[in-house]
Image (tube, helix red, strand yellow):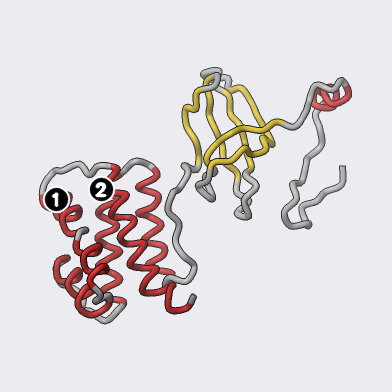
Amino acid sequence: MPSTKDTPGEVEFFPLTNKEMSGIQQGGFKPTHATFECGACGKATQGRVVGAMIRKSDGKELLWCMCSCDRQEPTVLVKQGETLISQSPISKEFHPNDRWPKDLAALYDEAAKSYSASAFTACAMVCRKVLMATACAEGDEDGKGFVDYVNYITESVLTFPRAKTAIDSIRSIGNEANHKVTIITRDDAKRAMQIVTYMLDTIYALPTA
């Protein structure tokens, strides 16, 4: 089969093994699909399975899947029967906007990865860092306390009442995690992600929309 690696969006299929060729000739190999949440776009999909194997060490099945999204990145599933054991990369619910400053987008992406990995306390901590870094990027001085940066954002950057209410609510999430051993819940981590997403979009994406 000719190579298609120079054609964007197409998969290059390598030479078939004797077993694969025999399976095709006998009609035993047909396109297979799996339902999963894409590790690239985060959406539920029924993607094409481009490869599969049974792992010798424990008998679990590995599936290499491709979503139909434009990111075109593979997702690897590990399954025991119909039960999903693990997935790599983990599906991400939150994604940075390409209109944000690159350093803030990279920091935000770390928070998104923490959230996807169920590291909710770590996620809240990175969300605090995103807010502080944003305040400095918008003109505040380095070396201040977290509350000072929250005040700067709500008093000098996003000054309308709804913004102040939303951004100010991140204080309780961050402070609880920062000053004592308190495990942040999924709901609170999600709220922190939504707040910083809203903040970054409002500052950097809306004016250029």
* In this view, 14 is above or below 201: above
Quadrant in the rendering for residue 13: top right
| Secondary element at image label 1 | helix
**Residue 22 on image: x %, y %:** 85, 22
**Residue 2 on image: x %, y %:** 87, 47
* In this view, 165 is above or below 191: below
Drawn side of residue 100 relative to residue 178, left or right: right
Q: Residue at x 77, y 52 (%)?
A: 5
Drawn side of residue 25 relative to residue 125, left or right: right
Q: Compute the Cα span from label 1 to label 2.
A: 11 Å
Foreground label between 1 and 2: 2
Drawn side of residue 12 relative to residue 102, left or right: right
Q: Circle 2: is it few (<14), some (14-19), or many (20+) Cα within 10 Å?
A: some
* First-in-chain label (1 vs 2): 1
Q: Which label number is shown at residue 188?
A: 2
**Residue 14 on image: x %, y %:** 78, 40
Query: Which residue reaches farthest left?
Result: 180
Quadrant in the rendering for residue 163: bottom left
* In this view, 68 is above or below 127: above
The residue that label 1 is drawn on is 176
Q: Residue at x 25, y 62 (%)?
A: 166
Q: Amino acid at mark 2?
A: Asp
**Residue 194 on image: x %, y %:** 34, 56
Query: Which residue reaches farthest front?
Result: 161
Q: Residue at x 25, y 54 (%)?
A: 125
Q: Amino acid at mark 1?
A: Glu
Quadrant in the rendering for residue 185: top left
